[in-house]
Image (spheres, helix red, strand yellow):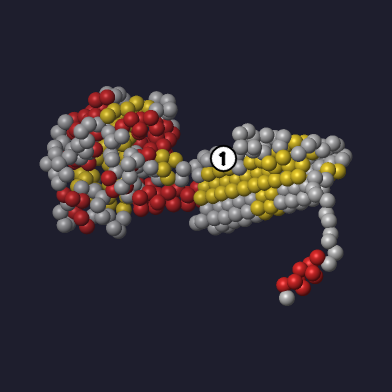
Amino acid sequence: MNQGVRAIVLAAGKGTRMRSTTPKVLHRAAGRALIDYVLDRCAEVGAETVVVTGHEAESVEAACSARPGIRFARQSPQLGTGHATQVALSAAPPDEAAAILVLAGDAPLIRSETLGALLDRHRRTSAAVTLLSFRTPNPGGYGRIVRQDSGAVIGIVEARDASPEELLIDEVNASIYVFDPGALTDALSRISRANAQGELYLTDAVGLIAKAGKRAEALVVGDPSEAAGVNTLVELSQVERRLFERRAEELLATGVHIERPDSVIIGPDVIVEPGARLRAFTILEGRTRVAEGAAIGPCCRIVDSEIGPGATVLDSCLILNSRVGAGAAIGPFAHLRPDSVVLEKAKVGNFVELKKTTLGPGSKAPHLSYLGDATIGAGANIGAGTITCNYDGVTKSPTTIEDGAFVGSNSILVAPVTVGRGAYVAAGSVITKPVPEGALAVGRARQENKPGWATRRATRKH
């Protein structure tokens, strides 16, 4: 952790090219707002942080306000990155002993290790400014890093203002800087709006610092994607894909088996233990946790849920805010709605839906059932086509199926109702009264056969 750091996060922009009413930094990638990633990195390097807001300032401030130690400075009117930095310094005057880290709020791929290296380089060289750069064969609209023949940085020129020769430079600005407070304050007092945009560019401060005879350094980052900002929905999708790729790479390195790393989506707060197996097109979101030995997929989506050791979630299952115990089996084509619990070695089979239901240890609902607001004990069997009628149009009522009970296929359990320990419900029954322990309940009309009826009907047709 670096000590003595003040971070300024620039988050005032509207993001016109996003074609959205949502402030740019609040667009989400891999389940989190863009600015959340940046603020996390600032915290990881020990920085006190000022967020500069402007467009939809209230929304941005509300999204960040729960974080401890965050301060805000509003930029109005918005006259460029240099002006935004001036506004931040006015709202929170710098500590002369603290380096000032300036970065954009729409750059979620930056790593804390890279910021740490940038700060270390700044201190080690006693530079007045140290900026992050990267090399690319297609520099496009990025500002070019201008160096002397000796390699010393003398400035940054924006693409709009660059000469044909400067446009050929392949080292470009990542828009992440560390400044000496005094050098920054002095340079900001001298920048002008004499440029193509008529704005105060923070990039101009680098050249002014160099012209004043102070040292300007640039650290070239090895992975150019770290510098990627988001200005369009296309760029948002590219950044999100890279976040997912990184997550898969991290998990592979810890011993998680991932069948198709390019196809999985794993959120930043998801925990997957070594030895788990994720098959193609698995989606894990929220605060999901997957234990060692569990196997998931393909084509499953799991949100805010816990999958226990050795559990199996087969093809095309949806699990929301639920818990699956050790050795349990889910799917294929199962749906666990919120507050469902499948305990150890229980089975939820194909086309079974659970809603706010607990399925006890070793119990099974192999296929084609709906179980809502139910508590099912250990070792119970739920036959195909069983449903719990838990809603009467006004209230939800519970169903209890005790240990070892057997519910035959195509049964309807009208809640509130209890099926006792070891009891049987005959197939095709409608159960409206409690079934005592060890009893057999038959709730269907008596069958009546009419001999010759079908033959006579067929004869009449001819």
In the rendered image, the quadrant that contains the C terminus is bottom right
Viewer-proximal residue among 291 and 285: 285
Viewer-proximal residue among 254 and 281: 281
Q: Amino acid at mark 1?
A: Asp
The residue at the far right in this view is 438
Disc 1: CA contacts within 10 A as few (<14), some (14-19) or many (>=20) = some
Q: Is residue 317 left or right of residue 210?
A: right
104 versus 279 height, above or below: above
Query: According to the image, label 1 marks what residue?
Result: 304
Res 432 quadrant in image: top right
In the rendered image, the quadrant that contains the N terminus is top left
Residue 280: image location, x then y, percent: 56, 57
Instruction: Name the residue at 60% across, 39% down.
Output: 338
Q: Is residue 456 left or right of residue 236?
A: right
Q: Is residue 345 left or right of residue 290?
A: right
Viewer-proximal residue among 109 and 240: 240
Instruction: Name the residue at 14% across, 33% down.
Output: 190
Label total for image: 1
